[in-house]
C-alpha cells in the first residue's frame, strides 16, 4: 500500500519534516521545563514546610511543658493559671495541625484559604503512622487539590505536629504555564513553518532549474545546460555532473548520427559500385543472348568485358568483406615481418603495372616488425596504386623506410597535384574520392584502398597519416609501433 506522503511534493515533505522535528523538540523542551519548574516549586514549598515545622514544633513543645507544669500545680492545690493557647488562626493556605497520641486533632491553625481541609485526611494518624513518613516532605493525594505534608513528633509526648501546604495554587501555576507554553509553541511552529517554506522555496530554485533543463532535453534540445553554481555545494556538484553527463549524451548522439550518415553513404556507394559492373555484365549478356554480337573476335571481346567486370565486382566484394572483418576487430596473427622484402616485392609489382611512374626506394637492409605480412603487403600495394592512379604519367614516387626509437616509419611520396585540406580530412573514408564525379572506370579499382590501409594499420596498433599541398605532391606515412599495444 502506497503511503500518502509519496504523493506530496518534495517541498511539502521537507516542510512537514521540519514541523514534525520542531514539534518534537518543543514537546520535549516543554516537558523538561515543566518538570524543572515543578521540582523547583516543590523544593520551595518543602523549604517553607521545614521552616514552619521546626519553629512550630519548638513552640508547641514549650507550650506542652508549661501545660504539664500547670496541671501539676492544680493537682497540688495551687492557683490555676490561664491556659496557654499556642495556636492562633491565620488566613493562609499553609496549615499546622496538632494530633494527640491517638491521632485525634487537638488544635490547628491556618488552611483557611483551602477548598478542602487537611484534618479530613490526617485524623487517626498515630505517632507510629507518622514515624513511617520520616522527617521529609511528601505529597498527600486527595480527592481535591493535593497537599504537600511534613510531620514531626513532639518530644514532650503531647502528640504530633503536621504542617501541610495545599498544592492548589501550585497546580494552577503549572497548568497556566503549560497553556502559555503551548500557545507560544503553536505560534513559534507557525513562524517556523512560514520561514521553512520560504527557505525551502529559495533552496529548491536550483532544482527547478534542473527540472526545466530536463524538460528542454526531453523536448529534443540536447544543447541545454544547467547554470553554474558553487562547486563546493551539493547543487553545484550535481549541476557539474549533470552537465558532464549531458555533454557525453550529446556527443554520443552526434557520434551515432554521424555513424548513421556514414552507414547510409557507405550503403549508397557500395550499391553504386556493385551496380556498375552488374549493369555492364547484364548488358553484355543480353547482347550475346539476342545475337547482336556475331561469333568470332567480337564474341571474345564481349566475354572478355564480362570477365573484366566480374573481376572488378569480385575485387570490390573481397574489399568489403575485408573491411567487415577488420571492423569486427578480429585478431591478426602477429609474426616477424621483413619489411625490406615486402617493400621490394610491392615496388617491383607497381613498377611492372605502371612503368610510366618511376619509383625510388630508400631503406635499410634489414627492417623487421611484428604483424601480418599479407595485410602489410596489401597496404603497400594500395598506397603505390593510389599514387599511380591519381598522378599524371611521369610522376616520380619515392618510398622511404626508417627505423626509429618508438617504431618503424614508411612514407610513400609523390610530386603530383596534391590534395586540399578538406580532402585530406576525408581521404580515408570509404568510397570517398577527391574527384566529385561518381563515374568509375575499370582502371580505378573499388575506391576502398585507403580505407583498407587505415583499418589494417589500426589493427596493427599503428596509424597512417597524410601530408599534402595542392600542386606540391602528397606523402602518406605508415607507423608501426615497436611493440604491439
Image: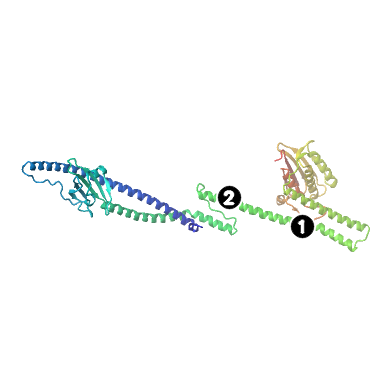
At 73% across and 42% down in the image, what residue appears? Answer: 479
Q: Nearer the viewer, residue 330 or 239?
A: 330
Q: Is residue 209 left or right of residue 177?
A: right
* Label 2 sits on residue: 244
Residue pushed farthest right? Answer: 296
Point out residue 77 in the picture as x, y percentages from the top left corner. 5, 42
Q: Is residue 247 above or below residue 479?
A: below
At 74% across and 57% down in the image, what residue appears? Answer: 268
Point out residue 196 in the picture as x, y percentages from the top left corner. 43, 54
Badge 1 marks a residue whose secondary structure is: helix
Q: In which quadrant will I find the C terminus? A: top right
Q: Give the colouring mode of the picture.
A: rainbow
* Label 1 sits on residue: 271
Q: Nearer the viewer, residue 325 or 20?
A: 20
At 88% across and 55% down in the image, what residue appears? Answer: 304
Q: Counting other residues with Cα less than 10 Å from the Cα at mark 2, is it few (<14), some (14-19), or many (20 or more)?
A: few
Q: Earlier in the sequence, mark 2 or mark 1?
A: 2
Point out residue 116 in the picture as x, y percentages from the top left corner. 23, 54
Disc tally is 2
Badge 2 marks a residue whose secondary structure is: helix
Q: Counting other residues with Cα less than 10 Å from the Cα at mark 1, is it few (<14), some (14-19), or many (20 or more)?
A: few
Amino acid at each position: 500500500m502506497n503511503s500518502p506522503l509519496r504523493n506530496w511534493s518534495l517541498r511539502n515533505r521537507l516542510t512537514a519534516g521540519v514541523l514534525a522535528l520542531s514539534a518534537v523538540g518543543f514537546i520535549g523542551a516543554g516537558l523538561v521545563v515543566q518538570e524543572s519548574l515543578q521540582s523547583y516549586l516543590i523544593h520551595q514549598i518543602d523549604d517553607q514546610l521545614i521552616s514552619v515545622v521546626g519553629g512550630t514544633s519548638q513552640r508547641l513543645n514549650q507550650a506542652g511543658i508549661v501545660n504539664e507544669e500547670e496541671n501539676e500545680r492544680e493537682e497540688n492545690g495551687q492557683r490555676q493559671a490561664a491556659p496557654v493557647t499556642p495556636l492562633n488562626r491565620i488566613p493562609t493556605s499553609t496549615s499546622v495541625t496538632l494530633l494527640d497520641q491517638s491521632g485525634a486533632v487537638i488544635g490547628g491553625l491556618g488552611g483557611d484559604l483551602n477548598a478542602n481541609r487537611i484534618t479530613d485526611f490526617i485524623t487517626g494518624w498515630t505517632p507510629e503512622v507518622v514515624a513511617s513518613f520520616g522527617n521529609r516532605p511528601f505529597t498527600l493525594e486527595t480527592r481535591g487539590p493535593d497537599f504537600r505534608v511534613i510531620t514531626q513528633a513532639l518530644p514532650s509526648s503531647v502528640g504530633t505536629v503536621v504542617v501541610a501546604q495545599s498544592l492548589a495554587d501550585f497546580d494552577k501555576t503549572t497548568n497556566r504555564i503549560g497553556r502559555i507554553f503551548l500557545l507560544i509553541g503553536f505560534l513559534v511552529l507557525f513562524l517556523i513553518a512560514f520561514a521553512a517554506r520560504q527557505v525551502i522555496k529559495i533552496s529548491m530554485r536550483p532544482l527547478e532549474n534542473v527540472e526545466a533543463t530536463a524538460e528542454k532535453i526531453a523536448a529534443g534540445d540536447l544543447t541545454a545546460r544547467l547554470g553554474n553554481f558553487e562547486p563546493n555545494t551539493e547543487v553545484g556538484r550535481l549541476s557539474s555532473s549533470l552537465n558532464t553527463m549531458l555533454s557525453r549524451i550529446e556527443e554520443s548522439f552526434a557520434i551515432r548520427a554521424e555513424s548513421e550518415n556514414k552507414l547510409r553513404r557507405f550503403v549508397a556507394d557500395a550499391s553504386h559500385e556493385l551496380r556498375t559492373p552488374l549493369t555492364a555484365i547484364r548488358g553484355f549478356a543480353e547482347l550475346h543472348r539476342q545475337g547482336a554480337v556475331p561469333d568470332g573476335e567480337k564474341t571474345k571481346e564481349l566475354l572478355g568485358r564480362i570477365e573484366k567486370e566480374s573481376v572488378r565486382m569480385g575485387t570490390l566484394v573481397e574489399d568489403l568483406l575485408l573491411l567487415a572483418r577488420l571492423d569486427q576487430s578480429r585478431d591478426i596473427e602477429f609474426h616477424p615481418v621483413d619489411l625490406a622484402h615486402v617493400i621490394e616485392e610491392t615496388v617491383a609489382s607497381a613498377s611492372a603495372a605502371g612503368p610510366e611512374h618511376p619509383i625510388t626506394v630508400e631503406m635499410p637492409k634489414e627492417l623487421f616488425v611484428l604483424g601480418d605480412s599479407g595485410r602489410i603487403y596489401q597496404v603497400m600495394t594500395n598506397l603505390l596504386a593510389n599514387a599511380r592512379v591519381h598522378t599524371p604519367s611521369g610522376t616520380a614516387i619515392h618510398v622511404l623506410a626508417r627505423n626509429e626509437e618508438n617504431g618503424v616509419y614508411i612514407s610513400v611520396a609523390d610530386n603530383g597535384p596534391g590534395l586540399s585540406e578538406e580532402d585530406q580530412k576525408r581521404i580515408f573514408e570509404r568510397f570517398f574520392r577527391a574527384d566529385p564525379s561518381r563515374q568509375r572506370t575499370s582502371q580505378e579499382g573499388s575506391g576502398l584502398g585507403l580505407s583498407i590501409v587505415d583499418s589494417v594499420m589500426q589493427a596493427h596498433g599503428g596509424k597512417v597519416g597524410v601530408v599534402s599541398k595542392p600542386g606540391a605532391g602528397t606523402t602518406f606515412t605508415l607507423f608501426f609501433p615497436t611493440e604491439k599495444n
